[in-house]
Amino acid sequence: MRYCVVAKYGELALKGRNRPRFVARLRRNLRRRLGDGVAIEQRAGAFVLFPEGRPHGNEPSAGELTEGVRELLERARDVLGIAVLHPAVAVDKQPEAASAAAVGLLRDHQGSFAIRARRRDKRFPLSSRELAIVVGAAVQRELGLPVDLDNPGCTVHLEVDEREIFVFTERLRGRGGLPVGVSGRAVVLISGGIDSQVAAYRAMRRGLRCDFVHFSGEPFTGPESIYKAYANVRTLDRFQGGSRLWVVPFGRAQRMIAAAGAGRLQVMAQRRLMVRVASRLAERVGAAALVTGDALGQVASQTLANLAVVDDAAELPLLRPLLAFDKAEIIAQAEELGTFEVSRLPDEDCCQLFAHRQAETRARVEELRKLERAIDVEELAEGLVAQARELRPGSATATTAGQLEVAVGKQRETTVR
């Protein structure tokens, strides 16, 4: 008997001829997340994760099972592409071994039970029903518990695989989706707010590997928004590893736009410049798309007309995973991800610098292009790209808070000069 976690993938099973590529990527992502000390073995529609060095035994208990695989479960649950996880024991393909495991898992249970059996290996001599009857009879004989097939207090599942029988009582939801990396690479425009972090997660869940760019209002704002972006990228990094964050000092560019007479077009001109800069940073790393946290109609800059105006300036496809989400849904997802508390901390939002008191809800591309010609937007974008500073929030030698403060200070000094 061996303690393990059965990690099942859902959507990947539908991929036909491309399935091996998706499964291979998922295996690599599991290895990155779980590290050494875990054996990863593939089965039909699942990976089985064996913590190496764990003691074997003849009869499990629910407490021992939980203790033995708790850390492994927590880490595996953040691997995108895994739909369901079962903390389980793997036993020999013998009815007696399955019976002993079921008795162990139910020994501390009070109340009714049921046995559900499933055979992946049809060569197993007993049918699923026959195996369930044999194991159920053993539980009754050893523990005296009543059977209730309709509304059991606890259900023991038996899955007969090619090499062993997996026995478990729990079914935990994974994050589902596709393995990070199978859909290519994107750059996320990450702010200090709530939405963009959730958009990044939704993009990762569809297989995109994400890097990040944050536009700071320096030298006219403090570094708080940079700290927030850094902290949130580090939180999101558990889903992919090796995340990069570019910080772009944007304040002088905003002042230049305002000085050119942008007025009510200030915010839209800023957003168009941001996607231009992000597009060029994306080209550096071979990213094929940009991602933003826009939700249709949430604020004035996110009306349908204004979204189209921003699209016009983007040099790559601009993806909006939250387009049809409402704010309550976004907040709930941010809370679950662990980014909400950081995002709600106060900071100086660069988008509000030099903003006109009246928001433009239906900007016209022609007017914005005229404004951009006046400030030579192409040269301005290239200058901002050159000033972008790269940070590695998710690396093994990730910047500490103190080192980050020094790095931000140096960047600010450079910007002021």
Image (spheres, grey):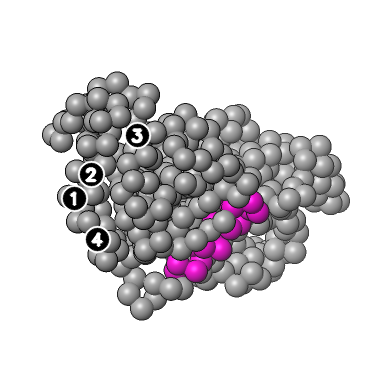
Magenta span dominant secondary structure: helix
In the image, residue 417 above or below residue 100: below
For the residues labelled 3 and 2, say whether their Cβ atoms are less than 8 Å apart: no
Mark number displayed over residue 228: none
Which residue is the site of mark 1? 130
- Residue shown at 19% from the left, 43% from the top: 133
Q: Amino acid at mark 2?
A: Val
Which of these two is toward me, 164 or 341?
164
Q: Earlier in the sequence, mark 3 or mark 2?
A: 3
For the residues labelled 1 and 2, say whether their Cβ atoms are less than 8 Å apart: yes
Q: Earlier in the sequence, mark 2 or mark 4?
A: 4
| Crowd band around label 2 with a 10 angstrom C-alpha radius: few (<14), some (14–19), many (20+) | some
> SS class of the residue under badge 1?
helix
Marks 3/1: CA–CA distance: 17 Å
Q: Amino acid at mark 3?
A: Val
Which residue is the site of mark 4? 125
> SS class of the residue under badge 3?
helix
Q: Amino acid at mark 1?
A: Glu
- Residue 351 lies, in percent from the top left, at 57, 44
